[in-house]
Amino acid sequence: MPKELSKKIKKKEPFVIPPVPDKPQQCHFYVLRKRRYCGLPAGKTSNYCGEHLIAHPDNAGADVRKRIPCPFDNSHTIFEKDLEVHLKTRCNARPRESPACHSLNVNCTLPLSQEELDFQKNIYSHQNMFVQPWLARVQLSELSRDELDSVITKVTSAYEQHVPTIDKHILTHPTAEKKRSSLKNAKHLDQLSSLLGHMEINGMLKDKTACFVEFGAGKGDFSSYIKKALGEVDGEATYLLLDRKSVRNKVDMALQGQSAHKSTVERVLIDIKDLDLSNVECIKDKNKKMVAVSKHLCGCATDISLVSLMHYVEHEKAKGNSNPITGIIIALCCHQLCRYEMYPNMDYLSSIGLSKQEFERTSKMSSWATCSMTKPEEEGGAEKDLEEDEHENQIDEENNDQTSNHFSGLDYQQREEIGYKCKRVIDAGRVQYLEKYGFDVKLVYYVDSATSLENCALIAAPKQALN
């Protein structure tokens, strides 16, 4: 073994928990995942904080009150005597009354399995599972070479027939560019700035009185930039923020504005598969034009969002309201999370010869586009952008192999090309679905691949409206 290599290989020493820091009321619980002691203060008569008493109930001098895991979300604990009050009024994970816009599975194309229905009853289960079980069962490495080649052949044929040349059109918008000088890492700003630029040239920012619906809103940053781009200061616009669960640092209050007339802002916590837009309070009977946006809408979330929008179009047209939606712009990503039962265009899948099983394999294979080549470590180390890449946790370990010894027999460049074809074939069906409802639709590479490997956006507007 070369000396240079032998120097780099060090024997792994067994990990030893360091002594407890000599600080007043220091909790004695060592958080192994964070490699440090708990930062919460210990009780006056205990060596442990309230959260970690459960880990050491027999600790000398510990509080006599017993802590138990919360039945709704076992990631936190509560005092047993407070259980009833906590479950009724305090726990953020407690079941809530369904909003008026809830209609179970209304946006699913096919019925969901009982396994999936049970899994989705508690959205907190998604925090503790790396991948959904029905997706984990699709293992490309277990396929024979003939089975794998069959899917690749069908994808290649569909790509050649249905996917047009996609232009790269990177734009900026002055509203977003004002913030550039204050950022060390402008990746997310690049994406937002270009999306706003495309909204501008496609007429989605003309109407200050429109209702802007942000799917997968998170904090609501995209809507915040839209408000500034509109220049509306007198509460003209309406903002609807949709997400499955609550997040911190929301911008909802800022969206209302500072004027006497506040903008209408409504946040709905709901799974999009159950969303009936026509019954959302800020939309119902308001006769406002709608613009739908999203910067990050993984896999099947894009599909069920498009279906919910087209259901709304049908509902409004039945009332005599033509063109209720004036624009749709969605940054596409994470096609490996697509679900056959939620894909909106079954006729398209039949036309290209993809069965349910082959669609699931195509979706899984799409991850080759973004994780077949290990990225070099970024300079800056600890100074890396604190806002993590949303797609970072979606890496498929089965396919994350940059060598030529991959089970497919393909090198990473070939796999990357096939992965992108899988993504665009899935997107082509989405395009055709919207076209059936009278929309002009296009796919565009809105940022450079160096900014994000997930750099394709779907842009739609009523016919004759797109630029």
Image (cartoon, rainbow, N blue to C red):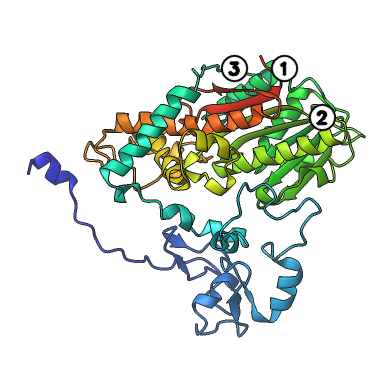
On the image, which quarter does residue 40 sit in?
A: bottom right
Residue 279 position within the rendered picture, expressed as x and y whole percent measured from the top left: 82, 46
Q: Is residue 232 left or right of residue 136?
A: right
Q: Residues within 10 Å of mark 2 (few under 14, many from 20)?
A: some
Between 149 and 182, which is closer to the camera in this rendering?
149
Residue shown at 33% from the left, 33% from the top: 415
- The amino acid on which the numbered mark 3 sits, given as a three-letter code, is Leu
* Res 289 label: 2
Do tag 1 and tag 3 residues touch (Cβ < 8 Å)? no
From the image, state whether disc 1 or disc 3 is nearer to you. Answer: 1
Does 280 appear above or below 317?
Answer: below
Q: Which residue is mark 3?
A: 171
Secondary element under disc 2, as helix, strand or loop, is loop
Label 1, label 3: how far apart the Cα atoms are? 19 Å
Which element carries disc 3, helix, strand or loop?
loop
Instruction: State the residue at coordinates (30%, 51%).
Output: 142
Which label is found at residue 465? 1
